[in-house]
Image (cartoon, rainbow, N blue to C red):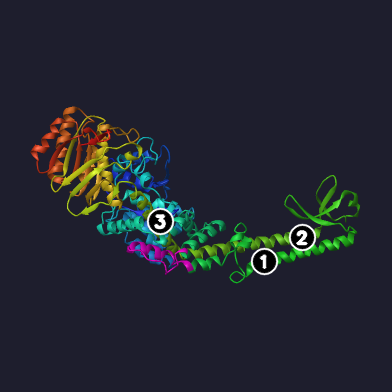
Amino acid sequence: MVAVHPSTGDIVYDTFDDAFMRNELETRLIHIEPSEILVPQIISVPTQKLIRHFTVGEGAVRIEKMPSSDNFCTDYNAAMTYVSEFYSESERAKVLSTVMELPGIIIKALAALIRYLKEFGLSSMFHVGKYIKNFVSRSHMLLNANTLVNLEVYRNSTNYKEEGSLFSVLNHTQTKFGQRLLKRWVGRPLIDVKKLNERVDAIEELMMTDNPKKNKLVGLLKKLPDIEKGVCRIHYGRSSPTELVHVLDALGAVSTLFNNDIEPRFQTEMLNRLFDTLSTIREDILEYKEMVHPQHASDKTKFLKSEKRWPDIPREKNNIKFVESLLHEHLEEMKAATGLSDLHYVEVAGVEFLLEVANTKTKYVPADWIKISGTKAVSRFHSRYIIQQLKEREQHRERLGLLVDQAYKDLLADISGKYESFRDVVSCLAQLDCLLSLSVASSQPAYIKPVYKEERSIHVKNGRHPIVEKLTTYVPNDIHFENTQTTMILTGPNMGGKSSYIRQVALICMMGQIGLYVPAESATLCMLDAIYTRMGASDNMIKGESTFMVELHETSDIMKHATSRSLVILDELGRGTSTHDGQAIAYATLRYFIEQIQSITLFVTHYPSMSQFATLYPNHANNYYMDYIEEMNQAGTVYDKGL
């Protein structure tokens, strides 16, 4: 699989083995959020069903099939030849070595995608190898599709809108490109301790500091357009003069505002590195701004400062002026020849240099003049000389238009040469926007900085659900997993809060590894490599999957991928079938997790027999019952206390 984002220039690729349910493919499509999917002429039925699922409802994806003549998916040699030829030009040769290291199956997909996007003039996005990245990173946790949906990471489960999701709680970004990056951060919590500590330190300093750079940044971000898209459009040669001016002005403001060595530096190296990068393009931006007249962005013929670099442009402008001067001389000659001292030029309906004569004086008009238009009071004419000169002027205008268009393309190509530098600055701005957003989210009342430990232990005192507490009063709950005691068997009445509790556990762990403060009185967390959830019971008519089928496939997928450092949530496993069969499935599954995988497991069930695991495995499992106690404080107020 290869995916490109034309608006940002990002390119991601991945190879993976998938099961019948196509969970791996679904996970990637949810993260990438494609607007169009290019597929071979022939694909398997399970893949068809999964992709069809993305073509309905709001934000439906367009499916495009490769032409039957395109044999890249089956012929590796043809794909390799095409890709090699594409990167053979000198300016792209340095990218070829990066591309040649990609797996063969990726080369096939890449060739098909390059050919497809070349038809739309977008193939230049593949010229920069720096932005070709593997979708799966060893430094990030990849939340699968079920986890993203069950934990309401991007959309709520009621009306599938962003409001009421975890992202809506954390998103305080000021820019479009910052928001896009934050979405990736939220869906990919860190598992690299060094990177996590670096991000946490940066967020904490932004929360506490009064550094003037921070205040400048906040004011600047609110005014910035989507310069990430703008820089990419310049790179593709598709930016209009108006858009170019906006991008140059924005980048100029960024590079100038932070070009000051006198201001105090930050304590964290990450913030210093990001801010230092912002001023590196200052000279380039000033140079490019000197090449244009911003006030004439709506008129390409006046937009470029062309005298030195493009001398043919002012030459054609002078030719046009010369023709127009001849036309004005012709007017004086016609006044003398006709005796019409009040003869003058007018422009009507876009027709220029019309000789306007009162109808009472048309007898003085030469016979070779051609009437163009008129009213009850006046008539308007062109002489043959005027027609000849207007044709001459039009030829000069056409040549001027061609010269200006080519000069503008040359300018965009020049600026595109600094594409990587500009992209780096935009990337730093996006990271700073995200860090500011997370610092705002972490500054909420009763949020604390978690402590991270290497051993498998999770201790949270009075933890709260970060989404639910925004909507209603939430009863705090404790979380305790220690050493080998990593399995919680949770029972309780319907509507008792079991599902909210287990989601709370997952979200707090997830927020911690994003780099956030968490909603709790205190928190000690370990580094998880993944979070897996199996919650709810429903069929999927579009994919042709029954409730029981969905349940078993999702559980099987978790059992294949979970490790001892994974957090696994299984909610009401087995209720998609009969009581006895469901109980047997739940029993066997939990036993496998305790004996073989030994992950941190929250197992919600209604089966009474599951409680025996606390006796069978006293060093690994504990039973918990969801309940609450009403207590009255000294003021006489009744409040709930969770257990």
Q: Rate crowding at label 1 as few (under 14), some (14 to 19) or many (20 or more) other CA atoms within 10 Å.
A: many
**Disc 3 and disc 1: Cα gap in Å?**
44 Å
Measured as percent of width and height from the top left, residue 621 is found at 13, 41
Viewer-side residue, 214 vs 66: 214
Instruction: Give the amino acid type for the residue marked by disc 2 in the picture.
Output: Gln
| Vertical comparison of 19 with 612: above or below | below
Q: Which residue is mark 2?
A: 388
Q: Tell me how far mark 2 sits from mark 3, CA to CA.
A: 57 Å
Mark closer to the chain start, 1 or 2: 1
In this view, 98 is above or below 374: below
Residue 430 is one of the magenta-drawn residues: no
Residue at 34%, 62% in the rendered image: 270
Residue range (magenta): 257-282
For label 1, the SS is: helix
What residue is drawn where x is 30% and y is 32%? 539
Q: Secondary structure at mark 2?
A: helix
The residue indicated by pointer 3 is: 430
The numbered dot on residue 316 is 1
Q: CA distance from mark 1 to mark 2?
A: 18 Å
Q: Residues within 10 Å of mark 2 (few under 14, many from 20)?
A: few
Assign a secondary structure to mark 3.
helix
